[in-house]
Image (tube, grey):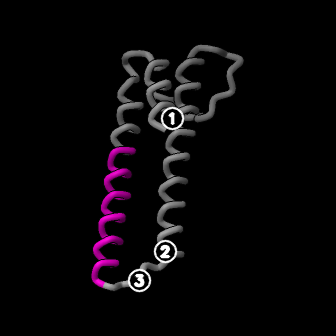
Amino acid sequence: MNKKINELYSILPEENKALAKLIQHTFEEIKKLEDYHRILAASNAVAGIKPDIQEDLTFKETLKTVKNVLIKELEKTVEDIQHRGDKNWIKHYEDGTI
């Protein structure tokens, strides 16, 4: 995923690169949540507490979905920025972009 963020970062005009940086920072925080969850599961295992497999799967799937949504929305925003001033472009966001 980081490869995609870097690709979009390079496409963005200089004044809009902060958008990609925001998504990158969000991904880093999600990674920290994943790491914390893994450490918590490991410490619970050492204490003899069995993990709830369904809960773990739901957690991982939710984070994966959030990452995919963030990338997709960044892609749509980049497309709108690239087509600024194009009267034939149908905007993804009617309220515009920065």
Residue 40, percent from left and from top: 31, 70
- Residue 74 is tagged as 1
**Image depth: mark 2 or mark 3 in front:** 3
Q: Is residue 3 above or below residue 39?
A: above
What amino acid does circle 1 point to? Leu
* Residue 41 part of the magenta segment: yes
Using residue 49 as the reference point, say whether residue 75 is left or right of it.
right
Chain-order first, disc 3 or disc 1: 3
Residue 93, percent from left and from top: 58, 35
- Mark 2, other Cα within 10 Å: few <14 / some 14–19 / many ≥20: few
How far is disc 3 from disc 1 in space, using C-alphas? 38 Å
Q: Residue at 38%, 37% (x, y): give it.
A: 24
Question: What secondary structure is marked by label 2?
Answer: helix
How far is disc 1 from disc 2 in space, using C-alphas? 29 Å
Question: What secondary structure is marked by label 1?
Answer: helix
What is the span of residues highlighted in magenta in the rendered image?
A: 27-47
Residue 95, percent from left and from top: 54, 34
- The residue labelled by disc 2 is 55
